[in-house]
Image: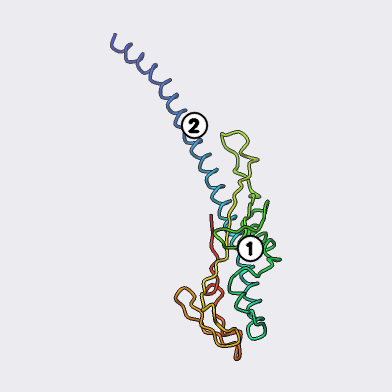
Amino acid sequence: MTAVHLRGDRGQTLPIYIWLTGILLFAAFAFFAFAQAASARNGAQSAADAAALAAAQDSRDELMTGLTGAVGKDGHWLDWLKGDLFKGTGAEAAAGRLAAENDSTVQGFTEKTVNGFPGYWVEIKTQYTVGKSIIPGTEDKHATAHATAVIQPRCHFDPAADPKKPVELNCDGQIVNIDPGKFDPVDLPDPSVLFSVHLAE
C-alpha cells in the first residue's frame, strides 16, 4: 500500500512541476520583453536628448560667430549676449546628424521658448525596433521620444555700459573683459562660458 501511495504522489507532483516551470519560463520571457522595451525607450530618449542639444549648440555657435563679428564694429554688439539673435538655419540639420549617429531619425522639429530662453523641441524615432518577444507586434515597433534644449545667456553687465569702451562681463562668477577698441577673437572665452546649453524638459 505504501509503494502505491508514493507512486501516486509522484504522479501528482509531475504535472505541478511542469505547470510551475511553464509559469517561470513565461515570467522570464515577459521580463525580457519589458527589458527590451525599456532599453529601446532609453535609447530613444538618449537620441532625442542628443539631437535637441545638438540643435541648440549649433545656434550657440552661430551666436558666437555673430558676437565675434560685431565687437568693435557694431554699436549694438552687447545685444548678442542676450542669446536670441541667432537664425537657427543649421539647427535642424545638426539635430538630424546626431539622431542618425544614434540610429534614429528626426520626426518633429520646432523652435520653442522655455522660461524665456530660446531653444528647440525635437522628436525622434528609432530606426531599430524593440525586437521579437512574447508580446505580439514588438518586432515592428519603433521607439519614439522627444526632448527640448535651450540656450541660456550666462553673462551680465552694466545696462549703462558704453559698447565703444571696455566692458566687464560677469558670467556666473567668471569675469570676462572685452575692449572693443583692441578686440581680438581669441579674447572671447569658450562658448559655454557665455551661453549655457541644457535640456529643459
**Residue 186 screen position, x and y as percent:** 58, 85
Number of numbered discs present? 2
**Residue 19 coordinates in the image, percent (x, y):** 44, 24
Image coordinates for residue 20, horizontal then vertical, percent: 42, 26
In the displayed structure, 51 sits above or below 131; it is below
Looking at the rendered structure, the kind of residue marked 1 is: Ala
Position above or below: 116 against 178: above
Crowding at label 2, few (<14), some or many (≥20) Cα neighbours within 10 Å?
few
Q: Earlier in the sequence, mark 2 or mark 1?
A: 2
Residue 51: image quadrant is bottom right
Task: Check disc 2 and report the residue beneath it.
Answer: 26
* Residue 58 in which image quadrant: bottom right
- Is 180 positioned to the left or the right of 31 in the image? right
Residue at the front extreme, as displayed: 160
Q: Residue furthest right?
A: 89
Nearer mark to the viewer, of 2 and 1: 1
Point out residue 152 in the picture as x, y percentages from the top left corner.
Answer: 55, 66
Compared with residue 71, is residue 26 higher up or lower down, i.e. above or below? above
Q: Secondary structure at mark 2?
A: helix
Contact flag, marks 2 and 1 (Cβ < 8 Å): no
The residue carrying mark 1 is 55
Q: Residue at x 46, y 28 (%)?
A: 23
**Toward the viewer: 160 or 40?**
160
Amino acid tagged 2:
Phe
- Which of the two residues, 188 or 162, is positioned nearer the viewer here? 162
Count residues near mark 1 (Cα–Cα under 10 Å), then give few for <14, some for 14-19, many for 20+: many
